Amino acid sequence: LAQNATDSIRLNQVGFYPKAPKVAALVGAKPGKFSITAPNSARPLFTGTTSAEQHSQVTGENVRVADFSAFTTPGTYVLRDAGGRVSYAFKIQPRVHEGVARAALKSYYYQRVSTPLPAQYAGRWSRPLGHPDTQVMVHASAATTQRPAGTVLSAPRGWYDAGDYNKYIVNSGITMGTLFSLYEDFPEYCSKFREEVPESANALPDVLDEALWNLRWMLTMQDPNDGGVYHKLTNAAFDGMEMPVQTTKPRYVVQKSTAAALDFAAVTAQASRILKQFPRQLPGLADSCLQASVRAWQWAQANPQVLYRQAEINKQVDPDISTGEYGDQDVRDEQLWAAAELYVTTRQPQYYQALQPALTEAAKLPSWNQVQELGYYTLARFQSQLPAMAQQWPTMRKNILALADEVKAGYEQQPYQTAMTKSTANFIWGSNATAANQGIALIQAYRLSGDKQYLRCALTNLDYLLGRNATGYSFVTGYGTKTPQHPHHRLSEADGIAQPLPGFLVGGPNPGRQDGCQYPFKDAERAYADAVCSYASNEVAINWNAPLVYLVVAMEALQDK
Ligand code: G3I
Ligand code: 9MR
């Protein structure tokens, strides 16, 4: 029967919590009854009637919705529609997303740089060490008197950013902020949440052990002479589709930037207050982080507009750098985020002053170049301990809720009944991270208001990512029935193993199609190609997996609500 399964019945291919809403979108379905059955039996365990047909303006599909929320018995099932079509098998059970949650966090272990991955932890994806990054050169764009071009530095560890092998401070910023916020929002759950990584037996929660691997790299990216932070550690050009151990190209740290300094200041300030809870395991590290944070902050105040413009740099010095730019040209949001983290960690009035201009501004959905909301989340989390903010707090609270309300408004009315599919503007490069970040915005609103409608809506975007979408894919490698097989991911492509590394969220539909690959469809919701060439729709990235980890872990932690 599984062979007859149709990808026109779109649902969360992993499954559903017993008491949660359960919805499938049926494309081109006959009207009438649908049923839920065991995979190998036609005997209905639940029957319902599909909704009236709705025409999607985006894809041209006609969609009916099957709602089986009232069916709560744990088990493994398929959905059968009026035309006799059968869905992929899915589960109804408590903790149904625990496997995805573990795998999504474990993806960071697979992205670790400068270390061998032994089979004990990496299984068939074990690999020898590559990119030791102990002999990194100062690029001419970063030359100073103390560190002239060609000076050799050691900056090991960190995570590979994405499908490529470079390490970018700006993108590490939002990634670390999201993972640290997960820990601060759900400390009990995170403390029990274990994967299988070398540090799992120690006293730290695994999510913090994993973040430490990248934090220790980030700390090496600060120039001790002035407190400035290099924008990235990179090859001059992208490595080929080869394994880390095969790569030999020189690596550089490039120009310092204000965005890098502020993201670094935010992350290290947040790290400092979290790691302070583990003085015996990590003696001195919290203090070092805070010192590093303050110095980066001071550098950024003295250098408020040092933007990273790769094309300009390439006109002036050699060698040319052609890897990811992460060229944020507006650092006001980075300034606010850093001020917020430093304020919460130190409670010093200067940081409070620095975040004044933005305190009453509308909230914006986070992305690598828009981090203001990360500051809002942190201020919200500690609000009861911040009496100085009492006056502004009602406005800020209203703004956080307003963003979530905008994400949520009317989602039940459109064909797929997810927040993500409400607007084609959501479908940019890395659109799947938009879905996950919308989920976080909704969870934050739930935490502030206690209104469960936000949680229900957040779950629609997890359903979206795991299969209730117009492509019919579950976008997390290895989780679901129809999952990406050919991500733009050097580690997955070059290892000679057919199955990609598990637990990775691919970028998702992106009508921009900047990679020039062949796409089966061009419309916003279906512009996705499961092809290695498609870096604009099928790459993986640390800043996309982080909100997935947050969303799935939060749903697991809140499943009984
Ligand atoms: O912001 C505009 C938006 O206003 C507009 O409506 C939309 C229309 O397409 O475009 C938006 O800008 C896009 C931006 O991403 C959105 O974040 C750009 O067109 C698009 O080119 C840009 O793509 C970035 C891409 O690098 C190319 O620079 C992605 O965000 C970013 O995630 C990606 O990051 C790469 C690194 O450079 C290298 N490592 C892999 C990583 C993931 O692909
Ligand atoms: O592999 C690169 C990927 O990580 C980037 O997101 C993408 C856009 O900057 O570029 C990819 O590299 C491609 C390069 O830009 C053009 N030549 C082919 C490369 C893919 O192998």
Image: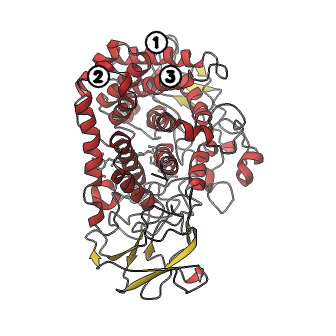
Give the secondary structure at mark 3: helix
Q: Determine whether, in the image, residue 434 is placed left or right of residue 131.
A: left
- Of labels 1 and 3, earlier in sequence is 1
Residue 258 seen in render: no
Front position in the image: 45 or 414: 45
Q: Which residue is mark 3?
A: 273
Q: Badge 2: how crowded within 10 Å, few (<14), some, or many (20+)?
A: some
Looking at the image, is 284 positioned above or below residue 58? above
Mark 2: amino acid: Met
Position in image of residue 178 (x %, y %)? 46, 38
Q: Badge 3: how crowded within 10 Å, few (<14), some, or many (20+)?
A: some
| Label 1 with label 3: CB-CB less than 8 Å | no
- Of labels 3 and 2, earlier in sequence is 3
Q: Which residue is mark 1?
A: 226
Q: Residue at x 57, y 25 (%)?
A: 137
Position in image of residue 497 (x %, y %)? 69, 59
Give the secondary structure at mark 1: loop
